[in-house]
Image (cartoon, rainbow, N blue to C red):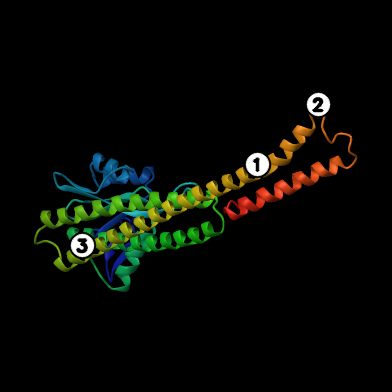
Amino acid sequence: MLTQYICKNGFTETMLNGTDEIPVWTEIECPDESDFLYMTENAGIPHEFIESAMDMDERPRIELNDEWRLTILRIPVVSSDDDSIPFNTVPLGIVTNGRTIFTICAHHTDMMGDFIAQSRRKNVCITSYPDFLLTLLCESTYWFQRYLKIINDDVMHAEKGLEKSVRNAMLIRMMKLQQTLVYFNTALRGNSTLTGRIERLYEGQYDPDLAEDAEIELTQADNTVNVYMEILTGTMDSFASIISNNVNGIMKRMTAISIILMVPTLIASFYGMNVNMSIAGYQPSFWIIVGASLTLTALIYMILRRSNWF
């Protein structure tokens, strides 16, 4: 889907080729064949830039090609697959030829809609390419932190569930949250490195306050991710120890039950042999054997009970 914007009290949508004004920003999200055709033939964006923006494994970087400049940063998205991790990161390509800006993303994200709404609420118009990059970095960091709060709530919910019963579903959920934090951590570190590259490459062309805000937000988000990773790792290790301790307790009880049941089995085995017994002709001998078995079983049970085997 292709949408074009001009700067009028924030980013205002305009009809494609509907005015003589050159759009300040062209947003291309989940492009189809017509969008690819527009990018290559109408806009003249280099093919390699489009391929890089669509590549899920691209890392944050800046690339130059004649008059064109490509900047790739990683942004957070909600995973569309219910069986996968809850959140992921995808590349966002920002391309410019010095006259207009294009953003290319292969996935739908709520971040861009919020970015546009914020510009309208605050009546902000960004025409400088470096400032546009830094503003997008700040916006992406806000969404990282927003999703991190959801992850933290999920971790607390999983912890409460594991306190009641250790289920595989809960452990798998926590494992996927841990994977998400690893992806977030990698993306934030890459974006932080990108911020320094923007400051060096566009020295004197950007708002220093905006650059400082971006650095602060990225540092806070990175610290938050690290804290949550440590908490989640410690929680997983603790529950692994609890599970191991529970298994040891169950095996201990099973061993104690086996010892208790061994006594009457042993006595019955002795008196079940085809040999002459001294009390074989005695009429209440059966009850004597049963009573002895029960007495010894109770005695062993009390000994094991005092030894904390039950």
Looking at the rendering, which quadrant does residue 147 occupy? bottom left
Closer to the eye: label 1 or 3: 1
- The one nearer the camera, 120 or 226, is 226
Who's the residue at 33% across and 60% down the image? 227
Q: Amino acid at mark 1?
A: Ser
User: Residue 305 appears in which quarter of the rendering?
Assistant: bottom right
Q: Is residue 38 left or right of residue 232?
A: left
Q: Position of residue 58 (x, y in %)?
A: 28, 44
Q: Would residue 208 be found to the left or right of residue 48 on screen?
A: left
User: Could you tell me the amino acid type at mark 2?
Assistant: Val
Residue beneath disc 3: 215
Mark 3 residue type: Glu
Q: Specify few, some or many for label 1: CA neighbours under 10 Å numbering under 14, 14-19, or 20 or more.
A: few
Of the residues under marks 3 and 2, which one precedes in the sequence?
3
Kindly identify which numbered label has been placed on residue 275.
Answer: 2
* Neighbourhood count class around disc 2 (C-alpha, 10 Å): few under 14, some 14–19, many 20 upward: few
In the rendered structure, find residue 258 and report the number of the disc placed on it: 1
Q: Is residue 297 visible?
A: yes
Instruction: Say which element carries label 1.
Output: helix
Looking at this view, is 260 or 51 the one in front?
A: 260
The answer, for residue 18, to whether it is visible in the render is no
Residue pushed farthest bottom? 122
Pair 2/1: label in front: 2
Sequence-wise, which precedes: disc 1 or disc 3?
Answer: 3
Residue 62 placement (x, y as % from top left): 19, 48
On the image, the x and y values in percent for residue 232 come to 40, 55
Whether label 3 touches label 2, CB < 8 Å:
no
